[in-house]
Amino acid sequence: MYKHILLPTDGSALSQVAVDSGLKFAKAIGAKTTGFYVIVERPPDSFEEYAPVEVKAPELADVAKQEADKYLKAITDRARLIGVPCETYSMRHASPHEAIITFATQTECDLIVMASHGMKGVTGELVGSVTARVITGCKIPVLVYR
């Protein structure tokens, strides 16, 4: 059976449901878990016209790291409550699905549990969601929560 489950999150409500379900599944089968958050890197000019002038790139990086820490702490807290071994990691990457696949492969995860859609909602499904790209680009099984 599965021994190491990756739980990617984007902090959305559905992602939290998938993480919680993944933790319960891990508890039932005696697997360890890893919570994972991708800090999406964007070229500086991709947000310049929308960002307030007083916001600087280093400040945005700090906010992104704080957000990652918040979502990963929620996974750690829930895992501790359920009694499941759990580590957490974040990674800066321009492509969330590539980061998830790379990390899962490097850490020898044998199952990825993730939500069917996240922050972009169902509209993300129309243009190719992170989940769909993980499913099609990864050799590791993916359990999708709808």
Image: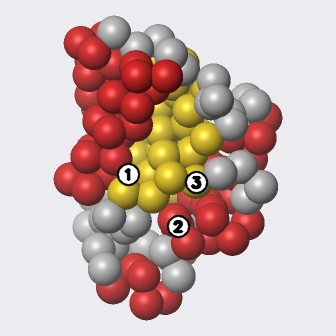
Q: Is residue 140 visible?
A: yes
- Secondary structure, mark 2, is helix
Write the residue at 33% across / 85% down. 123
Residue that numbered label 1 is attached to: 10
Horizontal and vertical percent for residue 3?
A: 63, 23
Q: Amino acid at mark 2?
A: Val
Write the residue at 63% across / 65% down. 135
* Residue, far bottom: 126
Against 38, residue 45 (above or below) is below
Mark pair 1, 2: CA separation = 10 Å
Residue that numbered label 3 is attached to: 142
Q: Nearer the viewer, residue 76 or 141?
A: 141
Badge 3 density bin: few <14, some 14–19, many ≥20, Cα 10 Å: many
Left or right: 33, with 55 as reference point: right
Of the image marks 1 and 3, the number of the one nearer the N terminus: 1
Mark 1 touching mark 2, by CB under 8 A?
yes
Against 132, residue 106 (above or below) is above
Residue that numbered label 2 is attached to: 130
Badge 2 density bin: few <14, some 14–19, many ≥20, Cα 10 Å: many
Horizontal and vertical percent for residue 30?
A: 50, 16
Comparing labels 2 and 3, the label whose residue is closer to the camera: 3
- Secondary structure, mark 3, is strand
Q: Is residue 67 visible?
A: no
Write the residue at 26% across / 56% down. 14
Against 13, residue 120 (above or below) is below
Horizontal and vertical percent for residue 35?
A: 47, 31
Of the image marks 1 and 2, the number of the one nearer the N terminus: 1
Comparing labels 1 and 3, the label whose residue is closer to the camera: 3
Write the residue at 33% across / 28% down. 24
Badge 1 density bin: few <14, some 14–19, many ≥20, Cα 10 Å: many
Q: Amino acid at mark 1?
A: Asp
Rendered-image quadrant of the C terminus: bottom left
